[in-house]
Amino acid sequence: MEFLLELLTEELPASHIRSALEQIEAGFRRELAEARIEVRRLETLATPRRLVAAGDLAEGQEDREEVVTGPPLAIAKGPDGALTAAGRGFARSQGVDEGLLETVQTPKGEYLGFKRKAKGTPTAEILAAAVPRILGSLSFPKMMRWAAGSFRFSRPIHGLVCVFGGAVVPTSFEGFAASDATVGHRIAGPGPVRAVDLASYREALRKSFVIVDPSERREIILAQIEIALAPLKAKAYPDPELLDELTLNVEYPLVILGEFPEGYLSLPIEVLSTAMREGQKLFSVVRDRKQLPSFLGVADAPADAKGLIRRGNERVLKARLADARFFWDQDRKVPLGDRAAGLKNVLFQEKLGTYEDKTLRLKKIAAYLCDKLGEAEVKEAAVEAASLCKADLLTEMVKEFSGLQGRMGGLYAREEGLPAEVHQAIYEHYQPTSLEDASPSTPAGAVLSIADKMDSIVGAIGIGLQVTGSSDPFGLRRNAHGVCKVVLDRKLRFSFPLLVDRILAIYGDRLTLGRAEVKAACLDFFAGRLRFMLEKKGYRYDLVGAALGPGIDQIVDAQARVEALDALKSSAQFEPFILMAKRIKNIVKGLPSAKVNPDLFVEKEERDLYSTLSIIGSNAQPMMARGDFARAQGIIFKLQPVLNTFFDKVLVMAEEKKTRQNRVGLLQSIAKMLLGLADYSMVVVEGEKAAKSKPSR
Amino acid sequence: MSVQDLILGLHRFWAGQGCYLAPTYDLEVGAGTMTPDTFFRVLDRRDWRVGYVQPSRRPDDGRFGENPNRVQKHFQYQVIMKPSPAAIQDIYIQSLRSLGIVLEDHDLRFDEDNWESPTIGAWGVGWQVLLDGLEITQFTYFQQCGGIDLAPVPVEITYGLERLEMFLEQKDDIYDLDWSPDVSYRDLRLREEKEFSEYNFNAASVAMLRRAFNACQKEAARLAAKDLVLPAYDMCLKCSHNFNLLDARGAISVTERVKMISQIRALVNDIARRYTTVKDGA
């Protein structure tokens, strides 16, 4: 039977709509599953003013046979098998014929009871109770109260449609009784709209200028863009995020093609597209990769018969572009080097100082990284880029369009005629801004990107700014992901803990926490972020844990380690080897470290193990040092048979103390070598899985 | 339609919605929100409806009369309705229609935009209202003011009068607007914009502004301690304007900025708390 729910609200932010639909779908699935209502179809739809769920549900719960249990048989029946007073009382109280009573087996013994048919609850009744629960538990990143109420929601609520099988479900939410009537488009068709199921609701709304299905609105936008651009033989510059957002911003999409004066095409494309996108949510129009003096907007209206919507948007864009042109011309009058002097007046963070302070640190960190990475030839460029990279914060353009920070600095540096290495490094030093964004394309850009982010992270942790759950005021997670991504993308080898040491030294006594504490917290934080990134790439959580076990001296090694484990995990040697490694770790756990003296070996098997270990070790060590963990692991597997024989024939905990310590020492050196590869004790093998903990967040 | 027709139209409309039409407040403020007709009246539980024109001074936005959109003083039409009426969006839309705007020919959008003012410990949730892409109104359900959770919740509707007028007159330059049939915005405001831009950015005495900031701050604290909350709040407004001037002059160092804003906020929060706890006999 058809089910339809609409919550009518004031205009919801696009991000809230996405999250609400997920919560609503999950809520209905959970409630209906718990109530044993069969869900044949369930979908969610939305406009900026409507959250909609619709589906095909069973009419009610299945009728069931249930067993009613009474008193224990010993009490209910006498020795002769006849009902006692208690037994008869039970039958009377349940209104059941004594002839229908029977013996019921329970874990606690035999009881008197009977079977009866239970009528299933109708779905409408289930929905009536579930709807207010589901809607009432929706949560949003920012919630508000309104009028005299204390209820919190994304935006104020205006009505509830809830219909099942053509009849209104007797329910209500926050004072709105469910009905089968809603309203159409705010301006174009506000009259009442009646609906009994999804099909009639869709069509009635369509007549009132509301397309309720976001995917249909998206198709309409794309089709209208194509029609609008066909005569120009041009394309909209692809911007899937903007398309998603606009799809959720309008009830009845109308694509508007407008123009701006050609003179503005001399502005950098970054500036043009930002002015269009961030101010007015407009798409750029390109032909053969060249920007045209046109834009596409999406209005919420049936038509623009008089061209007023187009002209209005053209006027607003023209004013913005005039501003941008003014900024572009003004900003270029002051060289970045001169502008950077003003950074002493711009606060980076109260305790961490100004952007001038940060710039001085960045120069040192960039120089250090170039040395460690063997990038001597770009060192000069990286340091110069570091000294200039924050100067654009003082340009009018970045004050107006903060999203252009970094990129503007790079463009202005290019206009000044600075070397390509310098202006490119400035241009891309904020990259990557997310795990999906590209890493810097140049060595100097990569160095500056890492330096900038690491300075922020070490500084923030050093003054006790905590990252907790949803709160990350300084963007530390994003920054840490950026650092890891650049290192992994470019396969950069440098000691991460030493970099942290260096930055701590550069900060000097500005930080409020002790250096050892900050360093430990940084390493911990990065291990956590790497764990998140590697698990997100699809590696098994226990393998990620094992790969991070040896620590993160080299960030690239964490990934190389997990890749090696992942490649080998299905080989026949893997599990027996893991079990062996765990066994060794258990034996040596807590024992004082002991030296191995080959002269003290007694048995042939321990001598064999020792010599095999020496050969394998000398082969595997250089592979590990250069991060080739898969090959190192392959070689180390060869210890397995020798170890098996060793454990078969040799008693590690020998009576004689020197013999015992010598054998322990031998196993300790194996454990130490294995830890250079991974912490195998973290790997979960068959049979252990149930007992181990869940993957991390 | 001239600017004064627009003001008259809004006055008539909001008076019809039961708003008291307040005279413009006689101190420099950065936004209509900061005058006592909004700041204090949203704090308590009593119903409140008001509409007024308020010049809004933003010294840093001065452009020496050379920018067609930006000025260091512009005019806001401020409406407060407490509690927020259920149909407030429809009422707002009617206000636009009452100005002769045929909305069927345009694209009206409520676009997510949450507002906050750290100086007066205030924030709210709402939208910027866009008409064919032009921001004409800030529409906010006020959640907190002076650090106090507001109940009932007021709605604040702030029209940018110049923006709306540029839309109504279909003009691209603010100075081309007509204030009345005989007086243009240029006649009234161009010289003021030039001179005040010069004052804001170059001529204002930093030493005098600092003294004034400090003196007003002390006075605000002294008056607040005597529960003279309205005079104390006036002193905070003066602090805020002096701060904005110092900022435009580029005279505020980084650490100072944070300190000065938090000093004003602490005073304002204290004043708000005293306002709600001290009975005024009403």
Image (cartoon, rainbow, N blue to C red):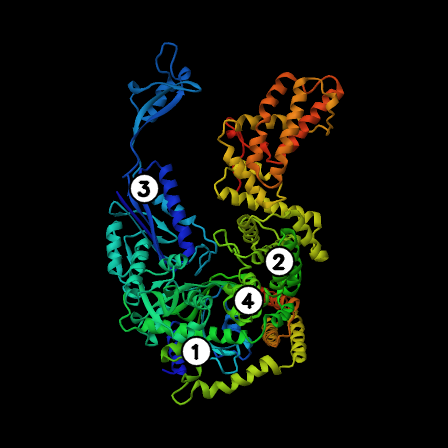
Residue A648 placement (x, y as % from top left): 61, 17
| Residue identifier under label 3 | A125
Residue A642 placement (x, y as % from top left): 61, 22
> In the drawing, what numbered circle is on residue A409?
4
Could you give the CA–CA distance between mark 3 and mark 4, rounded to whole angstroms? 63 Å
Q: Is residue A224 above or below residue A605?
A: below
Q: Verify CB contact (< 8 Å) between mark 1 and mark 4.
A: no
> In the drawing, what numbered circle is on residue B162?
1
Could you give the CA–CA distance between mark 2 and mark 3, rounded to whole angstroms? 75 Å
The answer to whether A249 appears left or right of A337 in the picture is left
| Residue identifier under label 2 | A377
Do marks 1 and 4 share a subunit? Answer: no
Could you give the CA–CA distance between mark 2 and mark 4, rounded to whole angstroms? 22 Å
Classed neighbour count for the residue bearing mark 4: other residues with Cα under 10 Å, few (<14), some (14–19), many (≥20): many
Q: Give the residue drawn at x 60%, y 36%.
A: A677
For marks 1 and 4, give the one nearer the viewer.
Answer: 4
For marks 2 and 3, give the one nearer the viewer.
Answer: 2
Could you give the CA–CA distance between mark 2 and mark 1, rounded to whole angstroms? 56 Å
Could you give the CA–CA distance between mark 1 and mark 3, rounded to whole angstroms? 55 Å
Closer to the chain start, of discs 3 and 4, is 3
Q: Which image quadrant is residue B258 in?
A: bottom right
Q: Amino acid at mark 3?
A: Glu
The answer to whether A303 appears left or right of A639 in the picture is left
Instruction: Provide the chain ID for the residue under circle 3.
Output: A
Q: Give the residue drawn at x 48%, y 31%.
A: A570
For marks 1 and 3, give the one nearer the viewer.
Answer: 1
Instruction: Provide the chain ID for the residue under circle 1.
Output: B
Q: Give the residue drawn at x 27%, y 50%.
A: A198
In front of the other: A575 or A621: A621
Q: Verify CB contact (< 8 Å) between mark 2 and mark 4.
A: no
